[in-house]
Amino acid sequence: MIKLGVVILAAGSSSRLGYPKQLVEFRGKKLLQHIVEVAESLEFSTQILVLGARAEEILERINLSKFKTVIHKSWEEGMGTSISKGISEALESEKDLEHILILVSDQPFVTKGTLQELVTVHLNNNMPATFSEYAGDVGVPAIFSRQLFSDLKELKGNHGAKKLLFNKNLEFETFKFERGNFDVDTSADVELLKQMEKK
């Protein structure tokens, strides 16, 4: 059986929004609750949730059953450090992991089917990494094989996993996820999400 872990990054302060975007509601669920439940519907060897800003407030309002929650005290240092923390914790929980899937808390259109297809593309193509592709760019959800774990653990600052694309001649696969470009950063995004909810 392939050993696959998942890390959800939800440590940011939502500074542009003014309150935790993890707790924004869409179709009756908090955004973080949605992505947690999607991940919990699949079989992973280990499941890590990285929280930071307002962690206690968020934990009070999110139901977790399979996830191990990690409080990243240095979350202000940027997403790179959250990725590093999540990867380290995943490997501490399951040292034999072969692949790790990285998710964020504010992509409301990620579904179980999305993640199943992403994992299938990654495993079938045997690449070091598989990124979601949308709006002419690549990003999360993304999955990484063991050969990149040490590089991910070394990420710092606000550089996410895409930094690996620029630092190395990294071979990677992409998975088309057209609605992946929508995330929540501002009050305008929240209003747009409310309009989408009615459709």
Image (tube, grey):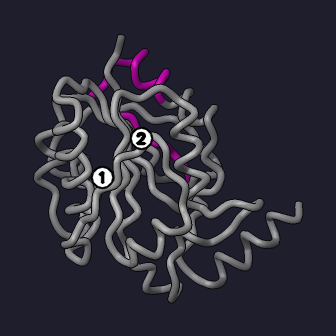
What x and y, as percent, mark residue 169? 18, 39
Residue 162 marker: 1
Q: Report the residue that reaches farthest toward the bottom.
A: 18
Amino acid found under the numbered disc labelled 1: Lys
Q: Residue at x 68, y 60 (%)?
A: 29
First reached walking from the N terminus: tag 2 or tag 1: 2
Q: Which residue is disc 2 drawn over?
A: 131
Q: Residue at x 36, y 10 (%)?
A: 1
Answer whether labels 2 and 1 touch (C-beta < 8 Å).
yes
User: Magenta stretch containing residue 122, yes or no?
Assistant: yes
- Choose between 74 and 59: the one closer to the eye: 59
- Between marks 2 and 1, how big is the CA–CA gap? 9 Å
Instruction: Please say if 102 is above or below 91.
Output: below
Amino acid found under the numbered disc labelled 2: Phe
Label 2: state its secondary structure. Answer: strand
Instruction: Please say if 134 is above or below 149.
Output: below
